[in-house]
Image: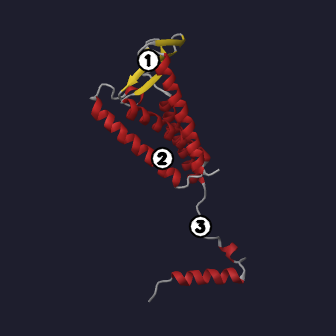
Amino acid sequence: MRDRTGVLLIAAAVLALDQITKLMVSAWIPFQIRIDLIDNFLALTHVRNTGAAFGLLGDAPVAPVRAGLVVVSVLAIGLIWAYARQGWHEPRVMATFGLILGGALGNLIDRLRLHYVVDFIDVHWGRYHWPSFNVADTAITVGAISLFIVMAKQGEVEKDSPMMTEAPPEECDNLSANETSVKKTAAEDMAPLN
């Protein structure tokens, strides 16, 4: 399976789950009604978010925010797809791209179709209340955090790996005549012309 196919499969799964759950919430839970799943911790609440993820910019004027979020979503989708096409062959990186791409597409579809995003996952603890979110927001957040962790670990590995250097003199003594002539030819080709 090609790397891009994996990205598309993960993105399609996230997109399908996101859109199906939003349709179910819209059909079965009246707007702004809360259904407690776990007392004092988790509920389903049908919310229409005109802002960004987790209610950010929710109080800003709707038209400029919506236009800006559509542009940002399209740019994010384009960047993720461009990176995926560049040949990142690390499966964990490709999986994070799929999560972010699927989530961005899910919220973009809502913004274009409804002019808002359906949020419904409502987490709270006592007086502390996290803004409602959805499957797309979760995929984007998990994907972004995972991408950061994977890339940070790759940076550590690359930093710790020895750099290529010239062979020590004792190894040069063991070169065959053919290897020596190739090295001389390469060195002559790189010598400045006078």
Residue picked out by circle 3: 165
Residue 135, image x, y percentages? 51, 29
Q: Nearer the viewer, residue 155 or 11?
A: 11
Q: Which of marks 3 and 2 is nearer the N terminus?
A: 2
Q: Residue at x 53, y 43 (%)?
A: 97
Residue picked out by circle 2: 80
Residue 136, image x, y percentages? 49, 32
Q: Which mark is residue 149?
A: none
Distance CA(mark 3)–CA(mark 1): 56 Å
Task: Tell me if I can see residue 121 in this picture.
Answer: no
Residue 31, image x, y percentages? 41, 16
The C terminus lies in quadrant: bottom left
Provide the secondary structure element on which disc 1 rests. strand
Residue picked out by circle 1: 129
Q: Nearer the viewer, residue 75 or 174?
A: 75
In this rendering, the label closer to the viewer, 3 or 2: 2
Distance CA(mark 1)–CA(mark 2): 31 Å
Q: Residue at x 49, y 25 (%)?
A: 23
